[in-house]
Image (cartoon, rainbow, N blue to C red):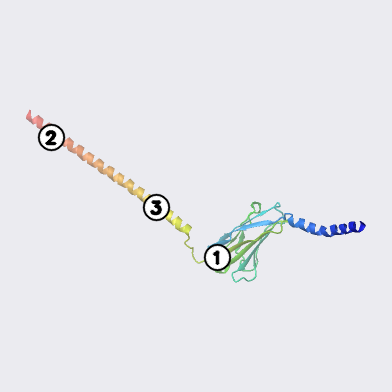
Amino acid sequence: EFGTASTQKTLLLSSFPLFFSLSLSLWPVAAVEVHTSREVNAVNGTNLRLKCTFSSSSPISQRLSVTWNFQPEDQSSHEPVFYYLKEPYKMATGRFKERVTWDGNIQRYDVSIVIWNLQPSDNGTFTCQVKNPPDVDGTIGEVRLKVVQKVQFSEIHFLAVAIGSACVLMIIVVIIVVFCRHFRKKRQEKTEAKVLKEKKKSGCKKSSIEVSDE
């Protein structure tokens, strides 16, 4: 009996780490979720706001940090773009020197930036990472940027042009109808005035004939 009890105790102690690790794996882990636009097209030479928002299970910490990186299309190493810790920090070197400004609001969970004077060499993937201690793990937002020479005529642009053309056409039709009614009214007034004038003339002639007969 002593041996059996000792064996059970040993099995219980040996299984404790397994139960402990299993409970940790099932326990909800605090994490930061980052949200970005998956793909963006922009025109060469223009400015672009790269939107990035986040959500966290913890209140906003004074140690919250934001890291923006860039990876060119050739899949070379990541390049730093922007860093935030209590205040914005611009890059002193690199392709984005003096070309990136902070356009976010931490209290609104917005960590967006603006890139000025886009160039074809900016084609690639931008990553946005937010750490809000104790939430230091989570998703990393990605934005794939494609810089084009001119605006592509998308379905939205086609719809906008179609709606604009329809509005202009309606305005032209309304103007034509108004002018037609106006001219028709003027013509009718002239006709009525002419008839009235002729009636007056015929009335005067009739009166003069009656006087002469007397």
Q: Nearer the viewer, mark 2 or mark 1?
A: 1
The residue at 30%/47% (across/down) is 180
x%, y% of residue 134? 73, 56
Residue 9 in which image quadrant: bottom right
- Amino acid on which the number 3 mark rests in the picture: Val
Left or right placement of residue 18 versus residue 159 in this view: right
x%, y% of residue 64? 70, 57
Q: Work out whether residue 59 or residue 12 is closer to the camera in this orientation and state it.
A: 12
- Residues packed near mark 3 inside 10 Å, few (<14), some (14 to 19) or many (20 plus): few
The residue at 35%/50% (across/down) is 173
The residue at 55%/68% (across/down) is 120
Q: Earlier in the sequence, mark 3 or mark 2?
A: 3
The answer to whether one can see residue 39 in this image is yes
In the picture, which quadrant includes the C terminus? top left
Q: Earlier in the sequence, mark 2 or mark 1?
A: 1
Q: Which mark is residue 168?
A: 3
The residue at 40%/53% (across/down) is 166
Above or below, 81 against 210 in this view is below
Farthest-out residue, left: 213
Q: Which residue is mark 2?
A: 205
Left or right placement of residue 167 versus residue 179 in this view: right
x%, y% of residue 33? 66, 56
Left or right placement of residue 86 versus residue 39 in this view: right
Q: Nearer the viewer, mark 3 or mark 2?
A: 3
Q: Which residue is mark 1?
A: 146
Rounded to the nearest angstrom, the CA distance separating label 2 from label 1 is 89 Å
Q: Secondary structure at mark 1?
A: strand
Q: Which mark is residue 50?
A: none
Rounded to the nearest angstrom, the CA distance separating label 1 from label 3 is 34 Å
